[in-house]
Image: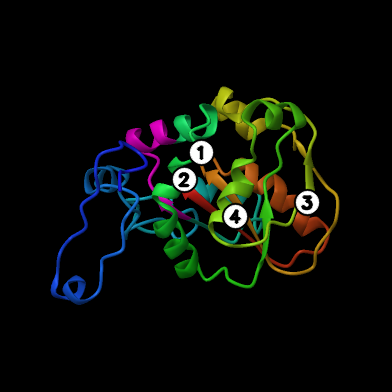
Amino acid sequence: MRCLICHAETIPAVTWGTFWKPPVQKKICRDCEEQMDKITAPSCPRCHRPGHEGVCHDCEKWEKTNPGLLERNVAAFPYNDFNKDLVARWKYRGDYAVLGAFKEDLQNAWLASGFKGRQVLNVPLSRKRLDERGFNQSEAIIQSLEQEPLSIFERSHSEKQSKRGRRDRMQAVNPFRLLHPITDPAVIVDDIYTTGRTVRHMASLLKKHGCPSVSSFTIFR
């Protein structure tokens, strides 16, 4: 089998365990796996910012200006240079197979998050953006987690968040509309947590209409 990222041949490790039972063929080579990295301790307990002891400055500011909106974010990988290129290939250049390379690690992070049993919400795209990409990345992640996405939001404009600077993102008017309020704990699933504004826009509407707890799960932080 070849790595879904770099297409190099993946060679499974041979151990006494694999002597009696054939090893599982990995879909990512060791080199790509090491470059993707994984978020480990220490990390911010609120947003999962890697390499941070205690609550980070951004989360402290969020709690002062918008207290209680988001319980926490859990992410699997740091948004490093290698992973930025993966996002570009997958999200903007249509290399859909890339997601399969780290599906197992993503599922493990999901199981460790403690979010099982919550309502799993996808982040909507505008019709224009959906037509451009051909898929909704949030729904694709949820499906890779073997969960059922709940679509209860719609987006009011199509401007790309990646085109905005940090200040513009923070000051942006809420682009979402809640279609169906829910009264169960929820987790919003997306590809990247950067400023945290997107998930808090959604969380503010959920909390306003009776949702008791909102968290988020992302591939990258």
Q: Which numbered mark, 3 or 1, is in the foreground of this view?
A: 1
Q: Are marks 2 and 1 in contact (CB under 8 Å)?
A: yes
Q: Distance between the residues labelled 3 and 1?
A: 31 Å
In the depicted structure, whether residue 217 falls above or below residue 21: above
Q: Which label's residue is closer to the chain start, 2 or 3? A: 2
**Label of residue 142 in the image:** 4
Q: Nearer the viewer, residue 60 or 74?
A: 74
Name the secondary structure under disc 1: loop
Q: Nearer the viewer, mark 4 or mark 1?
A: 1
Task: Name the residue type under label 1.
Answer: Tyr
Residue at numbered disc 2:
99
Q: Are marks 3 and 4 in contact (CB under 8 Å)?
A: no
Residue 167 or residue 142, whichever sits in front: 142
Segment colored magenta:
75-86
Image vertical order of residue 21 relative to residue 102, above or below: below
Magenta stretch: includes residue 77? yes
Asked if the residues shown at circle 4 and circle 2 are in contact, with their CB atoms under 8 angstroms apart, the answer is: no
Q: Earlier in the sequence, mark 3 or mark 1?
A: 1
Query: What amino acid type is highlighted by mark number 4?
Result: Ile
Give how far apart the Cα atoms at labels 3 and 4 are: 21 Å
What residue is disc 1 on? Answer: 96
**Mark 3 highlights which residue?**
205
Q: Is residue 70 left or right of residue 113?
A: right
